[in-house]
Amino acid sequence: MKDQIIIRTVSRILIPFIQLFALYVIAHGDLSPGGGFQGGVIIGSSIILYVIVFGIEEGRRRMPEKINDVLNSTGVLIYAGVGVLCLVSGGAYLQYSKLPLGSEHTASHLGIYGIEIGVAITVSAVMMTIFFETAGKNDD
Amino acid sequence: MIELFFGKYHYWIYIALMMIGFYAMIAKENLIKKIIGMNIFQTAVFLFYISAGKVRGGTAPILWEKAVLYDNPLPHTLMLTGIVVSVSTTAVAFAIVIKIYREYGTIEEDKILGLAEGERFREENPAPPVP
Amino acid sequence: MNLEAHLPILAIIIPLISAFVIPLFGRINKACAWYIAISAISLSFIISVSLLNSVLADGTVSYRLGGWEPPWGIEYVVDYLSGFVMVIVSAIAVVMTLYAKKSVEKEIDESRISAFYAIYMLFFTGLMGMTITGDIFNLYVFIEITALSGYALSAAGKKREALIATYNYLILGTIAATFILIGIGYLYIVTGTLNMADLKMRLPGLYGSTSVMTAFAFITVGLSLKLALFPFHIWLPNVYTHAPSVVSSLMAATGTKVALYVLLRMMFTVFTVDFYLKAVPATTIFLILGILAIISGSIIAISQTNIKRMLAYSSVGQIGYMVLGVGLANPLALTGSLIHILNHALMKGTLFMAAGAVFYMTGAENISDLRGMGRKMPFTMAAFTIGSLSMIGFPLTVGFVSKWYLAMGAIKSGMWWLVPVILLSSLLTAVYLLRVIETIYFSETGKETTPEDAPAGMVIPILILASLCLVFGIFTFMPVGVASRAVTLLLGVQ
């Protein structure tokens, strides 16, 4: 679709705004509809839009396979890591109020943000992986 | 009788959707249509949970100064998990269908079963050696 | 940080974290995937054993996730039954993972081995989570984790029939899991809580309501599909036949057992014993389906020519035994069911691993290709023989103990006619297994065969499980002790 000038121009303008909206959805997960999974899917679909418009090689240049594979696991490790940090700080697993980050209320809030960010990273990376795998090579 | 039908219309809607999805999963022969049926089936269950969580006179479960009564937020969180499970199952199902297409060349179930039966028949009754 | 108090969550988190560390390290060095897997599963096994020890010493262990009080928070509960099943699942997984090192190298593409081990660890995490959780929605999440990893694992091999089998399994498994979700929804609407202990307190007042009966019906049908109980067993033979050997062995030994554990947990802890015995005719249904499963599984197994398909139909029959125990619902029969969980895991694990070892060495899948294997692969075939004798129910092997308890339970319930049924099925099992043993040892191939057994990494796990069949058959007090305490807890009597 690279030669359709309307689609190319509009998507080039809109994709950063889509990603910004996704970050807004992630950050406001506990106050409005949204959260980690929804924001991650929106980021993933922004990259999928880019690949649909500009082609797979261009998309792979922007998101190399190595970084994609590392990001797949990083999000879950952040989630589990926050839980283990809570274990080490003396509470039960995922008891955010015991994290050493200020008052109990602040620590709870920041703990939830931490896991939402982890979820968003993994979900967006997995959406991209699924798309690249199914749209990619025709052999194997 | 009227009460049974109009008072609980959300249950009737969810049952209708569930049966449509279930029929599609069982009776349709195209593999992709079965996956679509699976999605409809699971969406009906999400409707079930969320409609059961509605409180008469309650607003959406988001903090708001002017609100007096909120809906139950627990079914919403449970169904978030359910939607993630549904998306993952659809993704795995599509991956398997793509591989089946690459191996067998078709995604109609009766043709695939015919090919597989032919293979099994040939495997269990190998052709006699040509003299 | 007091490590002792956090053991329940560590048993789940260590395999989960390793499942996501394996792809990261697999990029650097392909061989280290197996090492990470075996160390995580061994740690999980050690944690399960120590949890069972503390349960036997002090009583039920409970752990609150996030520090929230139940019933608002998720609670992990380890009592006699969960501890028993956790130790079985993690022990079998350790042995299977030792076996997997060589077997996976042959059956899975080399570029996918680290991904295979990652999903393998997720499958194991799901199984452990299903046994330890005390919250029904968390149970549904772990059921889905196990199911999705199972689908990916069984389609991982190189055979193309595996793909159709997996697709079939996926559709049926999703129907099952969604039915369980609907049942959970009805329970939540009626009581307002998701915690199992809290449901146990609130349900008795509501036994007459149709919502509770609908919930019971949906959950039972969903779990029977996962359990491969008689009319719902259609996915099982195809999946076990065409999946990679490690996957069939692990799923046959642990997958359906954990589903049986969930059934027991839901029947006896959530819907308490009174509901199960009096309000719905569930005992009759389980009795009938159990008997049909035992007879039909054994009869269909006789006519099979593929080794793994025969073992799969035999599994359908053995699941019938366990459900028969649940249907009789008296302490002796339930003890028999619980011990059969351990026994079937040991016996079927041995048999499937032996079949996988034969496939590894010769690529053979049919029984007729096993001619003279007794001389070619002596250790593997010795283990196969011990496993077969145990399945038939020879005294001194582990299979005899569970059939004895089931028969005692049947007599105690006044159903004398079940004892000939159990004996008949043992006879049918003998028919199809002794036929294989005859082909292995007593048929001539007409050419000289040198003993060339499977590599040590595969033979040692098979011999471990086969010897455990004999050990637990002779020293029966260990499993029977734990199982009878679990039954006392479940039934709440004496």
Image: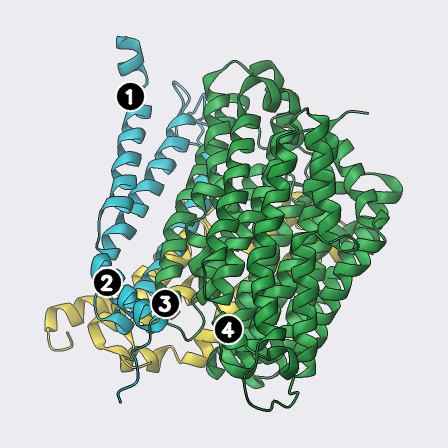
- Which residue appears at 59% of the width and 48% of the height? C318
Q: Which three-letter amino acid code belongs to the residue tagged 1?
A: Tyr
Q: Colour of chain A?
A: yellow
Q: Of residues B115 and C303, which is closer to you in this image?
A: C303
Shown in cyan, the chain is: B
Q: CA distance from mark 2 to mark 4?
A: 32 Å
Colour scheme of the rendered structure: by chain
On the same chain, marks 4 and 3? The answer is yes
Q: CA distance from mark 4 to mark 1?
A: 47 Å
Q: Which three-letter amino acid code belongs to the residue tagged 2?
A: Gly
Q: Is residue B31 left or right of residue C298?
A: left
Which residue was labeled with disc 3? C161
Give residue B9's mark. 1
Disc 2 is placed on an element classified as helix
Q: Are marks 4 and 1 in contact (CB under 8 Å)?
A: no
Q: Which three-letter amino acid code belongs to the residue tagged 4?
A: Ala
